[in-house]
Amino acid sequence: MPSAITPQAAKMRLVEIVRRRSYGTGVEIKLASGRTSDFYFNMKPTMLDPQGSYLLALLVLEALKDSPCDSVGGLEMGAVPMAASVAAVSVAEDRAMPAFFIRKTPKDHGTQSLVEGLPRGETLAGKRVVILEDVTTTGGSALKAIESVKADGAIVLGVITAVDRLEGAADAFKAAGVPFQAILTVDDFR
């Protein structure tokens, strides 16, 4: 990691920020997976915090340091701030990493694109991509993103999530033959 902060220090500080800005307990909440839980992670306040965004991007880039990845992205809305931060910080880290995002449904106007962030006329065909996700429960959202980018011709190298709730996503990705990494897990908050 070329920046002055070590990956361990970045992770410790990120846990503090997530705990303060994005983690909650004691309220039953319905998750994107359809499950209910008495704890939750709303990562947007962390991903939109200057230091949280920066640390998360550093840790994603650290996870990608030996990867031949050409681009990162994921399903709207959760992956958008994360992918944008990775793209911005990658320049300062001497590894320009373009980003994209996948709409849940194609636009009904303009280019009617499902994959956004690419220059006009460009697709993900032949590009090696890593799917990003803010919070992973069962892996369903990331698997949907994988389906979309593969349909665009991308080669999926794996999935990186900011927080894994440890509720089955790793098994789902393993069954799909997709490498999976979590920057943080629910165990970092217990």
Image: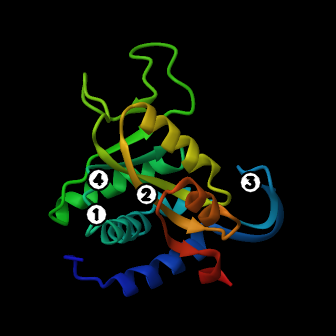
Q: Which kind of residue does numbered mark 3 sit on? A: Leu
Vertical placement of 133 versus 118: above or below?
below
Q: CB of mark 3 within 8 Å of CB of mark 1? A: no
**Tag 4 or tag 3, which sits nearer the N-term?**
3
Is residue 135 in sight in this rendering?
A: no
Q: Is residue 70 left or right of residue 77?
A: left
Task: Say which quarter of the image contains residue 31.
Answer: bottom right
Q: Is residue 114 left or right of residue 188?
A: left
Q: Which mark is residue 158?
A: 2
Q: Position of residue 93 (x, y in %)?
A: 19, 66
Q: Residues within 10 Å of mark 2 (few under 14, many from 20)?
A: many
**Tag 1 or tag 3, which sits nearer the N-term?**
3
Q: Label 2 vs label 1: CA separation? A: 10 Å
Vertical placement of 44 versus 15: above or below?
above
Q: Which mark is residue 67?
A: 1
Q: Position of residue 68 (x, y in %)?
A: 25, 58
- Kind of element beneath mark 2: strand
Q: Position of residue 186 (x, y in %)?
A: 64, 75
Q: Is residue 15 left or right of residue 62?
A: right
Q: What is the number of callouts on the image?
A: 4
Is residue 87 in sight in this rendering?
A: yes
Q: Label 2 vs label 4: CA separation? A: 17 Å
Seen at 39% across and 16% down, the residue is 111
Q: Which mark is residue 87?
A: 4
Residue extending farthest top: 109
> Pointer 3: what residue?
31
Q: Which kind of residue does numbered mark 2 sit on? A: Gly
Q: CB of mark 3 within 8 Å of CB of mark 4? A: no
